[in-house]
Each structure stands twice: as C-alpha cells, then as structure tokens.
Amino acid sequence: MFKIIAYICFVGSVAFFGLGTLGLFKFPDPYTRMHAVGMGDTLGVGLIGLGLLLLSTTWILRLKLIIALSLFWLINPTMTHLTAKAALIRGIQPVKNTEIRRG
C-alpha cells in the first residue's frame, strides 16, 4: 500500500515540475515566472520527499530526509523572494496593471 502512495507522490511531483516549467515559458514577466518555478519546485520536491519517506526503511534515513526537506522548504521560497526583490530594486518592472506593494 505504501508503495502505491509513494508512486502517486512521484507522479504528482513530475506534474508540479512540469507545471512550473510550463509557467516559466508562458508567463509574461520575470516575477510571475519566478513564482511558477518556485512553487513548482517546492511542491515537487515535497512530494518526492514524501514518497521517499514512505519507501525508506530506517529511522535515520527518515530523519535525514526530513532535515533535507525542511532546509529546502526554508531556503527555496526565501531565495525566490529575495531574487524578486533585488530585481524590483534594480528597476525591472512587471507587466502593466500589476499592483506593487512597498513596505
């Protein structure tokens, strides 16, 4: 039963990675592209990690997976946000009719 759920998680991760890549090519400005890739990567890696947790056999391996996932979930959204903020400071403008909140 765990193998079936793990394989479903792996297929879901491929779907999220694919949607993130599609957003990279279809969205109009760097900010929306960054959002698509950041969300796709975070959800894709999360599902891969969940699938690997279900298939792991030892507790030490599960602990290592949880630590790696926690670090990825902390670092990936933070770096996406900082990259977008740096682009906004450098003057790269989003598409028209986009609301920019300062502060």
Image (tube, grey):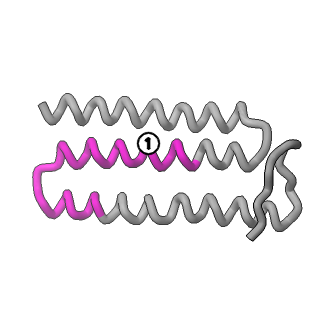
What range is drawn magenta here? 38-66
Residue 84, magenta (yes or no): no
- Secondary structure category for the residue under label 1: helix
Residue 64, magenta (yes or no): yes
Q: Position of residue 69 (x, y in %)?
A: 36, 58
Quadrant in which residue 43 is drawn: top left
Q: Residues within 10 Å of mark 1 (few under 14, many from 20)?
A: many
Q: Is residue 96 above or below residue 90?
A: above
Q: Position of residue 29 (x, y in %)?
A: 79, 43
Q: Position of residue 41 (x, y in %)?
A: 50, 46
Front-most of residues 54 and 97: 97
Residue under the point 56% across and 64% down:
78
Q: Is residue 25 above or below residue 80?
A: above
Quadrant in which residue 8 is drawn: top left
Give the quadrant of the N terminus.
top left
Give the quadrant of the C terminus.
bottom right
